Amino acid sequence: MSPTEIEAALRLAFGECLAAGCPLDPIQQEILLRALLDKLTQGEQTESQRTDRSVASTNPLDNLTPEQRRTLLRYIKEQNQQNRAWKAQLLNDWLQQQNSGEIQFVRTEYGLAWLEQIQPVHIAAYADEAAIALRVGDRIEVSNGLWEWVQENGPCSREWIPCTVIGLRQDSSLSHASCTVRFENGLEYEIQGIYEWNRYNWRWQQEK
């Protein structure tokens, strides 16, 4: 987490303290800000050194269980889509003693030191896993190739039908997974091998 993100999270917390009727005076704010920044940037290396170390060292995301990793990657993706710094959002929860929902495990099981190790290169290493992990409620499109023979240039061409994920059955490694979807006409369909042999037959719903 960069000093800028840390400061932004703290400033937000100070503002919420003011709104709650228990403001911190400027000296208290400065002490908290300086203490946290000093702690997190102590012994900080140059950017190039940090990058080299990140690439060479073990990916901290390897420490997570597959389900925890998918949950965190999903959270990062959602925060990025809203133009939010995901680490700053987490730190803000911690400063305010707020529960972080699905990713509360990051605080209770791994902590700030572990979180600070995560760099973009580590997240990128799991980009494929983040891209395919489905959850109930996701909107996707499935190909008619699931139930009929299609040819790209033949009389029966590929079509994409929008639907909603209503059920998932999978093991921790994403293999042997099945997915149940519901179409807009109310019909339901189960897709076996959703991440394996049938990955070609579904995609995230396209923007209109």
Image (cartoon, rainbow, N blue to C red):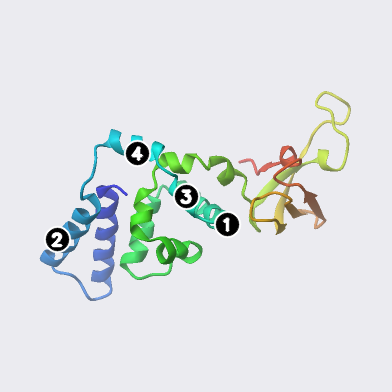
Q: Secondary structure at mark 1?
A: helix
Which residue lies under the disc numbered 3? 61
CA gap between label 2 and label 4 equals 32 Å
- Decide which of tag 3 and tag 2 comes sooner along the chain: 2
CA gap between label 2 and label 1 equals 39 Å
> Disc 3 residue type?
Leu
> Disc 1 residue type?
Glu
- Decide which of tag 1 and tag 3 comes sooner along the chain: 3
Badges 2 and 1: C-beta atoms under 8 Å apart? no
Report the side of 186 relative to 33 (left or right).
right
> Disc 4 residue type?
Arg
Q: Nearer the viewer, mark 4 or mark 3?
A: 4
Q: Is residue 66 visible?
A: yes
Find residue 207 and report its horizontal and vertical position in percent: 61, 41
CA gap between label 4 and label 1 equals 26 Å
Foreground residue, 179 or 80? 179
- Decide which of tag 2 and tag 4 comes sooner along the chain: 2
Badges 4 and 1: C-beta atoms under 8 Å apart? no
Q: Secondary structure at mark 3?
A: helix
Report the side of 178 relative to 70 (left or right).
right
CA gap between label 3 and label 2 equals 33 Å
Q: Secondary structure at mark 2?
A: helix
